[in-house]
Amino acid sequence: MNRKNDQVNDVILQTAAVIIFFIIIVFSINLFFAGHYSPGGGFIGGLMTAAALVLLLLAFDSKTLAAVLPFDYRKMTALGLVIAMLTSLHSIFWGRPFLTHAYDKFDLPLLGEQTLHTAIAFDLGVYLVVIGVTMTIIQTIGESE
Amino acid sequence: MINLPIFPIVIPALAAIFLLFAPKQVRLQRGVALGALLVTFAVTVLLIFTVSQDGIMTVNLGNWPAPFGITLVSDMLSALLVATSTLLVFFIVWFATYYFSDAYESNYVYVAMLFLLVGVNGAFTTGDIFNLFVFFEVFLISSYVLIVLGGKGVQLRESIKYLLVNVIASALFVMAVALLYGTVGTLSLADLAQKIPLVENQSVITVIGVFFVIVFGLKGALVPLHYWLPGSYVVAPTPILAMFGALLTKVGVYSILRTYTLLFDGGSAFMQNFLIILAVLTIVIGMTGAIAYNDVKLIIIYNIMIAVGVILYGIALNTQTSLEGALYYLIHDMLIKAALFMLVGMMIGITKSGQLRDMGGLITRFPLFGWTFFIAALSLAGIPPLSGFFGKLLIVQGGVGEGSLFGPLLILLSSLFVLFSVIKIFLYGFWGEEKRVYDGPLVPYMNRLIVPTFLLVAVAVAYGFGAEAMHPFITQAIEPLVQPEIYIDAVIKE
């Protein structure tokens, strides 16, 4: 490969990355929801999503990624922390110990009877924090060049 | 409120998270940080009074019962230390608002300071040893941010050392926790205290105990694990240095106090001798450093080591009197060390040099500053009735009561060295003639910087004069350490 040429031929990587990106995202969401009773959860799901974003970053560049997904990842970290913190705090208002979660069975349209659990909101916070932190680290290291 | 012990951890965390959204709005950052710290301090005072009336408070996080879930335990010891650290961080942040430039402040410095307090308060409050590790990591990661901020070459060099030492210490910590779990099968402090005496092979427990002392000794800068401390601390800006010097080493000492009295004091006399030897070495090396240097920051940094050694000696004796002395001295030292670091930081900010030979005559231009330093210096050395005196008195009493003379004499001797080292700063720095016109960057801000410093010294002096009023609280804090049954019964309610 001619290193001097800026126009590196990475058609295969770019084409594959776009397809694989969605597969990884879907799998990461699956992992995220699997989390309560089986292996998975916000941390793993978040890492997987961040991996998908890093794949895009490798195949294209940071400007393209910023144009496609215009998120401020530091704010995303903060938002995740807010969600996690508020979910942990809600139990205080019911006079229960910090971090106590609530759950109940609900009859949802289309899905039938499902259990809804506040732990999922906490996990969503973790998910956002993990993506935010990973992407902030990658961007800080990557952009200095 | 059954959740009271969680608030000193949650309030600073919420404020820090809120500030993450607006890193560039410096005024907002200052206001929210100070406001949150004030509210937290009010809560900790409420906590102290609740604990003093109703006894030890526990929260089982997530409502999982005690030996299985994560428990937070606020006994008087943790409540007092949490209140002291919150008050300190309040004064340090106040000081920092005048000390730092706007550009520096907009780099998440208050966020990191608040998260550091979250970690420290959490470490004081947690009731199981794994979460002690977690909260150690919280404040360590914040401290990495704080020590690197500014990015001067010498700072980066020292922060690599600091980072390496702490990463290795953390790895050792996890290993020690794993060994403990493998041997006893639980990590809740109260449950451990119940089960450790039942372990057949007590020498394994001693080995794990030594492991923990090494881990906490690395944080608390016990000789021979202190080598990283002077270099790393001396490069940090003054408010950061005040925070590190006053809080981080003391968390290490607190952890030794908690684990040694609760878990590792049974069995052989080995642990006690081991701790006494470490304490004596730390005092001796600290004394040597304190009189050897002419750099004002380094003199105070070596004074940290003397204090750590003195407190550790009190802990090692493990009697009601000596532990009361150790706790009394611990709180005193947190207050006065932060104040002294702020004061010497101001000296450097005025004269643009850390060396005593470049200073002199500061008191003629800044009389209040000079006398504040003088009182802080006397208090550090333990001149009665200032706050350093009572702690040392109790530790020495405890030592003599155990029939030992060498330790108490060394502590008294160390007081002389402390006095010499700080009076040296006073004589060369404040007394005498002005060497030149001082035009350091802090000169225009002196009138404002002196306010938080003066108030902090005033708190320390009040702590000394109010020793009698403090005594019931200190006694109540030490009781669960001397009689672990109180602690165990409070956590595991059967």
Image (cartoon, rainbow, N blue to C red):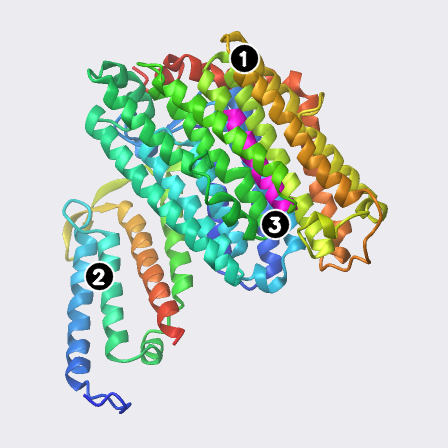
Please name whichever residue, B121 or B494, is drawn nearer the observer in this view of the structure: B121
Residue A119 picture location, percent across and down: 27, 45
Q: Alpha-carbon neighbours of circle 1 within 10 Å: few (<14), some, or many (≥20)? A: few
Residue B290 picture location, percent across and down: 61, 37
* The N terminus of chain A: image quadrant: bottom left
> As shown in the figure, which amino acid type bears the numbered disc 2?
Met
Residue B334 picture location, percent across and down: 58, 34
Compared with B233, A71 (above or below) is below
Judging by the rendered image, the residue that carries numbered circle 1 is B405
Q: Which of marks 1 and 2 is in front?
A: 1
> In the rendered image, is residue B270 in sight?
yes
Find the distance from the CA under tag 3 to the CA under tag 2.
41 Å
Residue B96's disc is: none
Q: Nearer the viewer, mark 3 or mark 2?
A: 3
Quarter residue A47 falls in: bottom left
Residue A48's disc is: 2
Segment tinted magenta in the rendering: B296-311
The answer to whether tags 3 and 2 share a subunit is no
Which chain is disc 1 placed on? Answer: B
Judging by the rendered image, the residue that carries numbered circle 3 is B238
Q: Is residue B177 magenta?
A: no
Residue found at x 41% / y 63% = A74
> As shown in the figure, which amino acid type bears the numbered disc 3?
Thr
* The C terminus of chain A: image quadrant: bottom left
Task: Find numbered disc 1 in the image and state the secondary structure of the residue it sits on.
Answer: loop
Q: Are marks 1 and 2 in contact (CB under 8 Å)?
A: no
Task: Find numbered disc 3 in the image and state the secondary structure of the residue it sits on.
Answer: helix
